[in-house]
Amino acid sequence: MTGHDADETAAPDAPSRRRFLLGAVTGAAGGVLVGAGGVAALDGGSTGRATPTTSAGTPGVDPHGDHQAGVDRPAALQRHVELAVLDLPARLPSRDDVADLLDRVGERVTTLVVGTDPGLGGLTPTRLTVTVGVGPRVAAAFLGDDAPAAQPLPAFARDDLSPATEGGDVLLLVRCDVGPAAARAVLALRDETGLDVRWTATGFAGPPEGLAARNLLGFHDGLSIPRTDAELAATVWSRTPRGATTLVVRRMPIDVARFGAQPVDAQQRTIGRERATGAPLSGGTQADGPDLNAKTDDGQYLVPADAHVRRAHPLPAGLDGLMLRRSYSYADGPGAEGLLFMAFGADTDLFVRTQQRLDEQDALMAFTRATASASFLVLPGFTPGRGLGSVLRD
Amino acid sequence: MTGHDADETAAPDAPSRRRFLLGAVTGAAGGVLVGAGGVAALDGGSTGRATPTTSAGTPGVDPHGDHQAGVDRPAALQRHVELAVLDLPARLPSRDDVADLLDRVGERVTTLVVGTDPGLGGLTPTRLTVTVGVGPRVAAAFLGDDAPAAQPLPAFARDDLSPATEGGDVLLLVRCDVGPAAARAVLALRDETGLDVRWTATGFAGPPEGLAARNLLGFHDGLSIPRTDAELAATVWSRTPRGATTLVVRRMPIDVARFGAQPVDAQQRTIGRERATGAPLSGGTQADGPDLNAKTDDGQYLVPADAHVRRAHPLPAGLDGLMLRRSYSYADGPGAEGLLFMAFGADTDLFVRTQQRLDEQDALMAFTRATASASFLVLPGFTPGRGLGSVLRD
Ligand code: HEM
Ligand code: HEM
């Protein structure tokens, strides 16, 4: 009556457990879980060439491939996000030590998404993704000054940051439809690294309505983004290191009461899209991009000059395409509710140049600022044969 | 192309809006919403006797009845909770002013659950409930020293409170499946009151697995609770004022890493139920209560002497029944993750005596403490004809 799964009795912190993680989660014929109660079959652990495979029945998202999960997949945002930014020691550990650490994190991600990781406390990690990155200091040291995100972000007009909420060395971005599972996963991963936490954030998304969920302002968020393989290849995936990308994350409190006190018409002109449908004010459906040239009969722009989607649009900025925005809402208390802005891009340039244009002029920016900000090189995808940290050794 | 709903152009803060709220949301033949785009029909606003009715198609939960929504209904927890505890001025306003304020809050709740409230920003309030209460100072002043929750909670062994996180005059408990809608609703209600915020909390629940969702520890939480009308009448609904109840809310950080590092067997013995199934260690299913007398063949209690479900069980404590626990998980950052404990009871006695027993001995309490704590008289249910605040005038 007090029976339990054999593998779950091992404390996650025990050295045996850690060793187990490095070589485990393998299975026959495409399946990971065998036996009753979710006991992971051990096979090949001693060869150091274990072959984790996630079956179609896995609750989380397969973390393996050319790119990490949690960038373009899954397409619809999970309901919950937990973000932890960690610090490496002031004196940077060796390349191999950092790479080994990241390998270990990758192995742990593998056991988390299949749902066998004891750190989950038995919770089901539905659509769990974990996306891991390194901060500018790490990227520059081990991949060179020209690597994506090797240079920290410049200061922006509306920054309201402190050292405790700016930058950081290691990114753990955990998303899941089950909030408690996301919280347990990020705890397990923090514990796996043993690193200090610099800052954290949590957020939530409503259900998707069409192509995107609505944010706290009631507007669909994440409509104009790269979706096709060609679009993703053009602006999201880095060429060197191949398969990497960058993430800019900014915690942006919004004066929701002041924004919401405006007539809906004014709200829509601030954004540049209709609130109810997500359609651009220039017409069409939510799937369409705004037509910045469209005018009323009396010559007024349908998308106002200071509308957010005009100011953020790549065309007038002379930019080559769109970043992949994956933002969440957050509500940490009075005056601390807003958007956890997250955008992936092949480098951080698209973001920087867009933010600078918004700082010059943008109707939406008057309602917000940034109280936390960081950029990361998101590591390329990994496979059972090639650990998450191996890009640092190349 | 920039069309919008006529009623939504009114700013929520405009006096006209507030007047509107006092007499609106009515409809013919059981329906609330008429016309395209969710325009609320105005009818009877001038008589001051509008008759809000929520149709079956309403996204939120009908707030009207003998009891407020959000206590026993809906049965399955919504995925998101926002809690705000507000302060009335140090010099308590008059009985009528407080009653009027609560009436106004009730009217606003009505427009929020039907989804027409401009404060929602167009978000859909799926399964929204708002539960409103008053703190000890208010209950004692207007309902007498013997009213439920008129006396503040005593201090407990593991309290780790500050004035900023203890007590408070007005409770707004907002739950919804759509996180951004919950956050907007609590903002709108705070704004409606114009009161200062004392403290706030947010939380989340996973999906129900059987009778209850799992908390951060991976255990089903909310299994042994009153469910039938008879059980609710026995321990949850107050007799005076009729239809009221009380809420105890405590923010309890849990050392999840330390708890989770134990073998599952030890975790289960700490709680007294199986983690995978929720069944008591004495046998049966998750729907069964623990049998505190059941022993192994060699005379050991199947539910250990210090197991949480034994220590919290009403029988050995000589208590008359069970409180209605409706707890959520929360994760506000490192060291600030745990349980947002919430329990309804006809008075706060059941809670107080149970907490005192847990403080004496309980295997679970060693992993937790309370960093925020308050108790409230949850107002009786209200109807269109009888405002939320009217109990204070009786
Ligand atoms: C309070 C913060 C913000 C909010 C609430 C917000 C909201 C929105 C909304 C509702 C849209 C239209 C729907 C869509 O295409 O997703 C949008 C578009 C966009 N936003 Fe933001 N945004 C914020 C900050 C930012 C920032 C900081 C950037 C980058 C520096 C940015 C870049 C963009 C881009 C590139 C688009 C698409 C423009 C186009 O149509 O081509 N946003 N945003
Ligand atoms: C860290 C805080 C807590 C956690 C994680 C927790 C968790 C649990 C769990 C998993 C159960 C078994 C399933 C169920 O019946 O719901 C339970 C039962 C219960 N808990 Fe707690 N609990 C906590 C604090 C408290 C507190 C502060 C009280 C009251 C003072 C309380 C009162 C009860 C009661 C009355 C039961 C049912 C006992 C029975 O089977 O008759 N709990 N709790």
Image (cartoon, coloured by chain):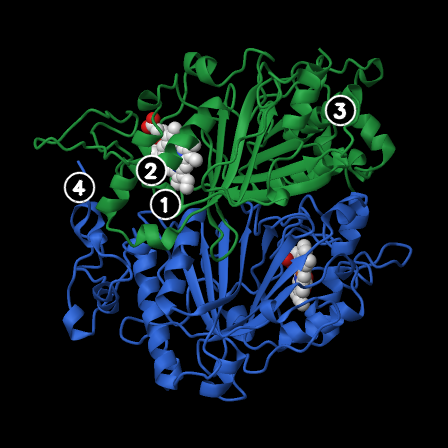
Chain colours: A green, B blue
Q: Which mark is residue B3?
A: 4
To the question of a shared chain for discs 4 and 3, the answer is no
Distance from label 1 to label 3 (Cα)?
A: 41 Å
Judged from this view, the residue extending furthest toward the left is A297
Q: Is residue B95 above or below residue A139?
A: below
Q: Secondary structure at mark 2?
A: loop
| Left or right for A376, reference B239 | right
* Whole-number angstrom distance, CA of label 4 to CA of label 3: 55 Å
Identity, as a three-letter code, of the amino acid under mark 4: Gly
Q: How many other residues sit within 10 Å of disc 4, few (<14), some (14-19) or many (≥20)?
A: few
Circles 2 and 1, Cβ within 8 Å, touching? The answer is yes
In the structure shown, which secondary structural element does the residue marked by tag 4 occupy?
loop
Q: Which residue is mark 2?
A: A362
For mark 1, what is the residue? A366
Which kind of residue does numbered mark 2 sit on?
Asp
| SS assignment at label 1 | helix
The picture places residue B307, in percent across and down from the top left corner, at 78, 59
Give the chain letter at badge 1: A
Callout 3 amino acid: Val
Disc nearest the viewer among 4 and 2: 2
Amino acid type, residue under disc 1 in the picture = Ala
Report crowding for label 2: few under 14, some 14 to 19, many 20 or more residues within 10 A (C-alpha): many
Q: Assess mark 3: CB under 8 A from ligand 1?
A: no
Q: Quadrant of ligand 2?
A: bottom right
Q: Nearer the viewer, residue A375 or B309?
A: A375
